[in-house]
Each structure stands twice: as C-alpha cells, then as structure tokens.
C-alpha cells in the first residue's frame, strides 16, 4: 500500500477528528452526570439556600445582611465593614466577625476570605453529601482526564504530520486538527480550574425552588438576601454600597434602583465606621 501507515489521509482525518472530540464529550457527560437530579429536596437552613442560590459569596452576603440588620457589624461610606461586639452566636456570622480585622475590609476581600473558611467548606461538604451541590474534586477529575488524554492524541497527530510532510501529502486539515487539540487542552484546563463558589446540581436547583424549606424565610432580611442577593437588602443605602463595592453579580436594575440613595452614603458617617447612622 502507498498510503502512510496503511491508511489514507481523508480516512485518518476522520478518525483523528473523532479522537479530538471524544475526551471533551466524555468529560462533559461526566459533568452532566454529576449535576443530575438525585431526588434530594430538603434544604436545612438559610445558609444552605444562599449557597444553592449564589455559592459561597451569597453565604457571606447573607451573614453580612444579618449582622448589619442587628448592628453586629458597621459599614462606612466607602463600603468598608468593621466588627463590633458582642460576638454573634450563629457560626456563619461569628466567622464573618472573626474574619474582619479591626481596621475593616471591603466585601470583596471578605468574600474571598470566607470562601476558604472552615464553616463555609463544611457547608459545601454537607450540600455535596446531600446531592445538592457538585463535588468540586469529582468535577475537576473529568476535565483533568480529558487533558491527559489529549497528550497522546496530540503526539499521534504530530507523528502523522512528520510522516506526511516528507511525502508531500496534503496536511492542511491535519494541522487544523492539531490546533483544535491545543484549543481543547486550553478549554479543558480552564474548566478544571478550582471553583470556590460551588455549583448546584439539578437536584439543588429544584430544591431551591420546590424543596422542603421554610417559606417564611423569604420574608426575613437574611432570607431575601439569600434568595435574591444584596439588592434585596431592605436598607437601600446599604444595598447600593455593598452591591457597588462588593463586585456583586446583581442585575444592573437592582443596583440602579438604589443608586440614588448611594449619593446619600457620604452623609451617613465618616470612614471610621460611622455607617450606623444610616439606619438598619
């Protein structure tokens, strides 16, 4: 036979194209399987609801909302949060207060610190045990395996190209497929990057909307923030400041609705934590 490796160029291209698609397809199937509906519907409390609705950032936001409502922390006109005493009994709120330095930090930095706090990590582990949230390590394994599979696939393509070029065989399609392999490696690498926020399963999203949890939570400050984000905080000045400084993913309409009140923040107190004069 005159064909390299006993297979024609078009036939090899078709086979190689299938190999290019296969690892990503299998990894996506694995990810979908992890997000399946496990039938779980019970949500224990408001912080579990917050995690399902908006990840670890929403858990932090919910705790901050509860503390602000009871003057457990202070917010100044620059969006800096300061701890106060006494230390709250709720473990999540206590974690927020213990994380805040005496000089205060912004919401964005607080979210980053809380995402690594043991109470949030334990909350995520509990959601994963209940089948309401995707296990991060298991999610990453699928994409890591895809990246590993692309190493021999890329080597095979390079070997075929090295064989085809001296024989002056057409290699444009093979080169494009090799570039596709590199793109697939980059995509798989990005998708296996650790996600500290957490991802709800299909069961988790159904539990959020139709599950077994106290509907009266939706009428409380912490419940509204857990379900809808900081834009739902009843004090519009605080809501506008936190949405603006926290880099929140709230809709522009929610932030814009309180933007007029944000102009009044400067009159609520100085940078020493005088935000308590704004109400709440």
Image (cartoon, rainbow, N blue to C red):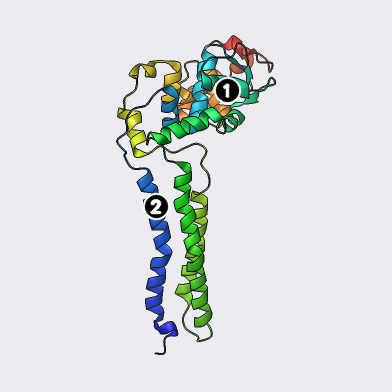
At which x and y percent is residue 56? 50, 32
Q: Nearer the viewer, residue 257 or 207?
A: 207
Q: Viewed as shown, does residue 27 lie left or right of 158?
A: left
Q: CA distance from mark 2 to mark 1?
A: 36 Å
Residue 159, placed above or below residue 101: below
Q: Residue at 56% across / 19% down in the picture?
A: 94
- Residue 76 appearing in the image: no
- The answer to whether 271 is drawn above or below residue 183 in the figure is above
Image mark for residue 28: 2
Look at the image and tell me whether residue 128 can be seen.
yes
Badge 1, how many Cα within 10 Å: few under 14, some, many 20+? many
User: Which residue does the image show at 50% across and 49% down from the upper left?
Assistant: 192
In the figure, residue 219 lies in which quadrant? top left
Q: Identify the secondary structure beneath mark 2.
A: helix
Q: Which mark is residue 96?
A: 1
Rendered location of residue 230, percent (x, y): 49, 24
Up-down relation of residue 116 to residue 163 (above or below) = above
Quarter occupied by the N terminus: bottom left
């Amino acid at each position: 036979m005159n064909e390299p490796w006993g297979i024609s160029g078009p036939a090899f291209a078709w086979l190689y194209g299938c190999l290019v698609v296969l690892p990503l397809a299998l990894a996506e199937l694995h990810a979908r399987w992890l997000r399946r509906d496990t039938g779980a519907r019970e949500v224990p409390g408001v912080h579990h609801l917050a995690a399902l609705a908006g990840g670890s950032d929403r858990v932090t936001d919910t705790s901050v909302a509860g503390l602000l409502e009871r003057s457990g922390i202070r917010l100044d006109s620059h969006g800096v949060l300061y701890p106060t005493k006494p230390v709250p009994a709720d473990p999540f709120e206590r974690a927020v207060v213990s994380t805040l330095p005496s000089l205060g930090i912004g919401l964005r930095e607080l979210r980053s610190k809380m995402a690594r706090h043991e109470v949030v990590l334990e909350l995520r582990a509990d959601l994963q045990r209940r089948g309401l949230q995707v296990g991060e390590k298991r999610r990453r394994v699928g994409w890591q395996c895809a990246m590993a599979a692309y190493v021999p696939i890329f080597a095979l393509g390079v070997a075929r190209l090295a064989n085809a070029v001296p024989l002056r065989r057409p290699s444009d399609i093979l080169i494009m497929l090799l570039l596709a392999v590199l793109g697939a490696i980059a995509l798989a690498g990005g998708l296996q990057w650790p996600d500290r926020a957490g991802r709800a399963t299909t069961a988790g999203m159904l539990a959020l909307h139709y599950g077994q949890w106290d509907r009266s939570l939706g009428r409380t400050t912490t419940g509204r923030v857990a379900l809808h984000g900081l834009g739902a905080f009843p004090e519009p000045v605080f809501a506008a400041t936190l949405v603006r400084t926290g880099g929140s993913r709230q809709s522009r309409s929610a932030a814009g609705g309180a933007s007029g009140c944000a102009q009044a923040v400067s009159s609520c107190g100085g940078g020493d934590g005088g935000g308590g004069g704004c109400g709440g």
